[in-house]
Image (spheres, rainbow, N blue to C red):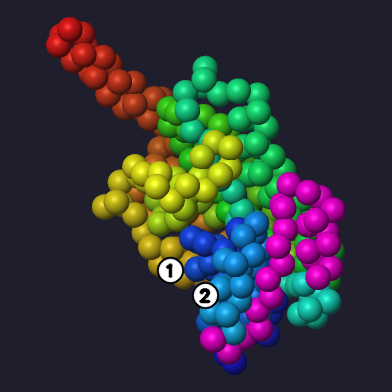
Amino acid sequence: MAGKFADSVVWVTGGGSGIGRALALEFAREGADVAVSGRRKDRLDEVVEAVEALGRRGLAVPCDVTDEAATGAAVATIVDGLGKLDVAVANAGFGVSGRFEKLTADDWRRQLDVNVVGTAITIKAALPQLREHKGRAVMIASVAGMVALPTSTAYSASKFAVRAMGLALSAELHGTGTTCTTIHPGFVESEINQVDNQGHFDPTREDKRPKKLMWTAEKAARVIVRAVHARKREYTFTAHGKVGGFFGRHAPGLVHFAMTRGAGKRQAHGQAKA
């Protein structure tokens, strides 16, 4: 089967839904065999069936990405089942929300353990295989890793850290033939807002992100796969994500002014009404 990743083996964590699921199917369309990891085995099995319907091999590998032994065992299972590993996508993550003063130590530990430590040990476990096959490490960060918004303190901190990891690893791998790509999505359809601060999925939770700015997971997967194939060091999408990321990196004072000016107006309006 022809494609950008013909006869490659790809591992996607957080592969049971959202961007992870879409990535698994897009890699399969591009010729890859795909292993998916996550906590919900039924979701993983559904993705494997969809991968196999596209003519590629699929493998469900349940894994807690915060457990270093589990990520190592997952890589061993993938190599045993699919023969090798060429691309590892550390996509598993969730978002803790709330004002800084309201967040507990446990909130911070959960956020950083999944999004930062989980990303790190996922890629670390995969690196021996990636080095052997001159493969690709992929970290899914966020535009929130370049511009931080109120009530997203913990999530933004975790994604700032993922960006730092990706840039550092990219430099460490320079000249080896193995590369690291850090992806910064803007708003993409997913279940992230249906997961509470304890990491529990609740389908009744409202997704308050702006729907008019939302990309589908399928559209996001297509541009991510192209960026990974091109071995880009960093890739940011959507259009609003690129704008936000640019100002977050190069004009943080302007971003601060825009956010606090709006807050000041709302406060003044509330006082006038009172």
Please report the residue visible at 67 percent of the width from the left and 32 percent of the height from the top.
109
Q: Which residue does the numbered mark 1 point to in the structure image?
A: 218
- Residue 65 counted in the magenta span: yes
229 in relation to 195, above or below: below
Please report the residue visible at 44 percent of the width from the left and 45 percent of the height from the top.
193
**Which label number is shown at residue 179?**
none
Mark 2: few/some/many CA within 10 Å (<14, 14-19, 20+)? many
Q: Which residue does the numbered mark 2 point to in the structure image?
A: 26
Q: Amino acid at mark 2?
A: Glu
Please report the residue visible at 26 percent of the width from the left and 52 percent of the height from the top.
212
Please report the residue visible at 61 percent of the width from the left and 30 percent of the height from the top.
107
Asked if the residue under mark 1 is in contact with the one under mark 2, i.e. CB atoms within 8 Å, the reply is yes
The span shown in magenta is 53-77
Label 2's element? helix
- Residue 73 counted in the magenta span: yes
Q: Amino acid at mark 1?
A: Glu
Q: Nearer the viewer, residue 139 or 181?
A: 139
219 in relation to 261, above or below: below
First in sequence: mark 2 vs mark 1: 2
168 in relation to 265, above or below: below
Image-quadrant location for residue 264: top left
141 in relation to 269, above or below: below
Looking at the figure, which quarter contains the N terminus? Answer: bottom right
